Image: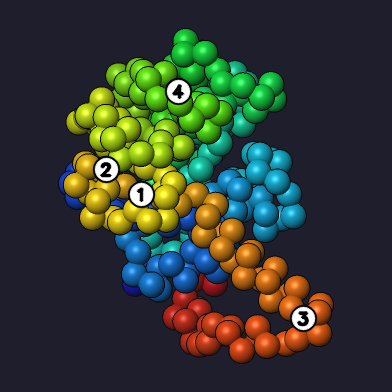
Amino acid sequence: MSRTTEEKRAAFRALHREGCFVLPNPWDVGSARMLQHLGFSALASTSSGYAWTTGRPDYATTRDDVLEHLRAMSAAVDLPVNADFEAGFSNTSEGVAENVRLAIATGIAALSIEDRDVDNGRLYDLSTALERLKAARLAIDQSGEDVLLVARTEGLLIDGDALTPAIDKLVAFADAGADCLYAPGVASKEAIATMVRAVAPKPLNVLVWDPGWAVSEMADLGVRRLSVGGSLASVGWASTMAAATAIKGGSFEPLRHGASGLNGIFEKFSDRR
């Protein structure tokens, strides 16, 4: 039986109270349903993974594109969906607030707001980033919906050595009402442990940067949730590109390695068409 939006949101909030969980990133309805079938407890959208399905680079999709994507994904699965909502699709705090209200209406359980000024290729200064985050916080609170607010700083993706500024921003975001903190690009266990301590007791999301990491190691560091961003979608693209390259060269051998049983898996979701 399908879970209601309220049930999914409550389940997602409960996941953040203790332990460490993996939040894989589907890029469309099919991949979302497959990840539910495989037993994950929650999902997170990926802006890059979704953009690639439309033949565009990351940050090239529109707000309305993303809202429709989130609506379809949230309706397609019984798992809570954390929305990669980029920088809120507006340069103004008022615009961020309005767009957050629209995102909440899609049925998501959480959304992240970045501090990246996409149009100008830089980060917002702390004061501006806080104004935008507080606008998102107020929009959620006024909605009366139990949606988590994830605050992201993209600083480490620009300068991998800028750990202290990234932590300072996360702490300020936590104080401003973020429910969960996220700085993609943190790359060492020592830095992760420092970040966990800095934002505690708020939970920290870590983007898997090193495929050699183990969930148990991250749990020991105090990380609450792990996501993979566009990496899972990239793996799928790599497999398709390798197979297509072989076919172009005259060999159909890669076709021996396709997934089996897909119809049977997706038939289980027929009541959600």
Q: CA distance from mark 2 to mark 3?
A: 43 Å
Residue type, label 3: Ile
Q: Do the numbered discs 1 and 4 sit on residues whose CB atoms are within 8 Å? A: no
Residue type, label 1: Leu
Q: Within 10 angstroms of label 1, few (less than 14), some, or many (20 or more) residues? A: some
- Please count the marks in the image: 4
Q: CA distance from mark 2 to mark 4?
A: 20 Å
Q: On the rendered structure, is 109 left or right of 105?
A: left
Residue ID for mark 3: 247
Disc nearer the start of the sequence (2/3): 2
Residue ID for mark 1: 226
Compared with 215, 172 (above or below) is above
Which residue is depicted at the point 42% across and 50% down?
A: 210
The picture places residue 6, in percent across and down from the top left corner, at 33, 51
Mark 2 or 3, which is nearer the eye?
A: 3
Q: Do the numbered discs 1 and 3 sit on residues whose CB atoms are within 8 Å? A: no
Disc nearer the start of the sequence (3/4): 4
Residue type, label 4: Ala
Residue ID for mark 4: 162
Mark 1 or 3, which is nearer the eye?
A: 3
Residue ID for mark 2: 223
Name the element at disc 1. strand
